[in-house]
Amino acid sequence: MIVLGIESSCDETAAAVVRDGRHVLSSVIASQYDLHEEYAGVVPEIASRAHVEAIVPTIREALSEAGLGLGMIDAVAVGNRPGLIGSLLIGVATAKSLAWSLGKPLIGVDHVQSHLYSGLLIEPSETGAESIALRDPSTLFPALGLVVSGGHTSLYRISSFTDLKRLGATIDDAIGEAFDKAATILTLPHPGGPNLDRLARSPGANDRAFDFPISRLGTESLDFSFSGLKTSLLYQVRGVPNARDAALAVAPPLTPDRQRDLAASFQRAAIASIILKLNRAYASFSNTPPRALFVGGGVSANSRLRTDLQAWSADHGLPLFIPPMRYCMDNAAMIAGLGTVLLQAGQSSDLTLEAVPTTAV
Ligand code: KG4
Ligand code: ZN
């Protein structure tokens, strides 16, 4: 089965062709990065207009790279939630038009859930990945899911890829947003997250130089919070406002060494809170422990998080499904992949499919 995936939830216009839910025949991403850079954030109206211009050429390119014509597509999957409403509408309207004109099924896919699926994608060149990725996924459930991105930080119980339950989510900033804000506070250039990651692993970096708070929330909470950590970093860089202790009111100069150690210490605390909640989520499965860990989203490209998750999974004896870098970021292959699973489970959509700003579960 060949599925065309379309993704336009935020600032990337993406199209992909995936065979049998796993094999990526093409994955094309038209980034709007340059358009939003000067505003230091995504401007919704600019994003929608750019999607309108890019969507048809991006789909054409994906089909051409896959070496297929539109007539060879069996279904059209589209990320219809969550995201910026104007951006989502472009992908949804395009997918509906294509599905209707081709007389093929349409499938609406939750963008956040599809990030979890991205570790199952394989490319024809990846022979090493075949053995694990082609293992019958039903032997991997129930599984634990972690999405860490610019817009989301969530934990999931995955009973199957058609039955997911969100266990917890951030109550303020998403982790990627926190990395980006921290990078701005540390005066690092865009893109903030990857630059902070690079600095934090540069020679001499001391991740214990600053004792930043590791967010716990309640004793059983599976939610996340990153705003306290961000404020602590801000105070280290700019001083504590209205501090009674005059020594705290003014921060020492942000020398390259201090900048590097602040980055490493911030990253350690942010990731420690992820691991802490992962431990709690694991325990919440009680009698039927998870049999795999699926991770996705832009921050799963972070080098330390990847290392720590590999160690965590090994400690718990779980296979870890974490995508290669190109599928950590927003892409349409994950939409086509999860779309195929939904279609095979009889969960296709009709032309009343709506673009919805919020996540499904
Ligand atoms: O998944 P994504 O493209 O966006 C959403 O769907 O929300 O993720 C983008 C986020 C940005 O905040 C970016 O700074 C962060 O992922 N990111 C990283 C790294 N690479 C990307 N954060 C930390 N370390 C990285 N290496
Ligand atoms: Zn995303």
Image (cartoon, helix red, strand yellow):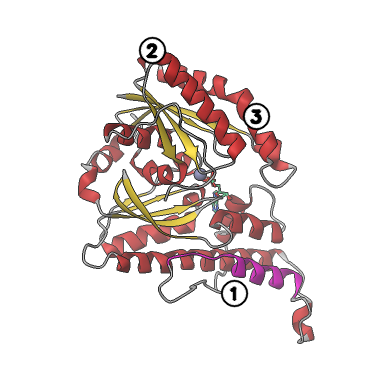
Q: Are marks 3 and 1 in contact (CB under 8 Å)?
A: no
Is label 1's Cβ within 8 Å of ligand 1?
no
Whether residue 231 appears in magenta in the rendering, the answer is yes
| The label number, if any, that marks residue 71 in the structure image | 2
Is label 3's Cβ within 8 Å of ligand 1?
no
Question: Mark 1 or mark 2: which is in front?
Answer: 2
User: Image point 54% across, 57% down: which residue?
Assistant: 175
Q: Is residue 54 above or below residue 304?
A: above
Q: N-terminal of the two: label 1 or label 2?
A: 2
| The label number, if any, that marks residue 227 in the structure image | none
Q: Is residue 17 above or below residue 200?
A: above
Please tell me whether mark 3 sits on a helix, a strand or a loop: helix
Please tell me whether mark 1 sits on a helix, a strand or a loop: loop
User: Image point 55% across, 35% down: which residue?
Assistant: 88
In the picture, residue 206 is in which quadrant? bottom right
Give the x, y percent position of residue 361.
Answer: 42, 51
In the picture, residue 228 is in which quadrant? bottom right
Task: Kindly tell me whether residue 205 is visible in this rendering.
Answer: no
| The label number, if any, that marks residue 209 in the structure image | 1
Task: Kindly tell me whether residue 233 is visible in this rendering.
Answer: yes
Give the x, y percent position of residue 190.
Answer: 67, 48
- Within 10 Å of disc 2 (Cα), the crowding (few <14, some 14-19, many 20+) is few
User: Principal SS element in the magenta part?
Assistant: helix
The Cα atoms of the two marked residues, 1 and 2, are separated by 59 Å
Q: N-terminal of the two: label 3 or label 1?
A: 3
Tag 3: residue type? Answer: Ala
User: Image point 41% across, 20% down: which residue?
Assistant: 66
Of 330 and 81, the residue lying toward us: 81
Residue farthest to the bottom, as pictured:
245
| The label number, if any, that marks residue 50 in the structure image | 3
Q: Which residues are magenta?
A: 222-239
Tag 2: residue type? Answer: Gly
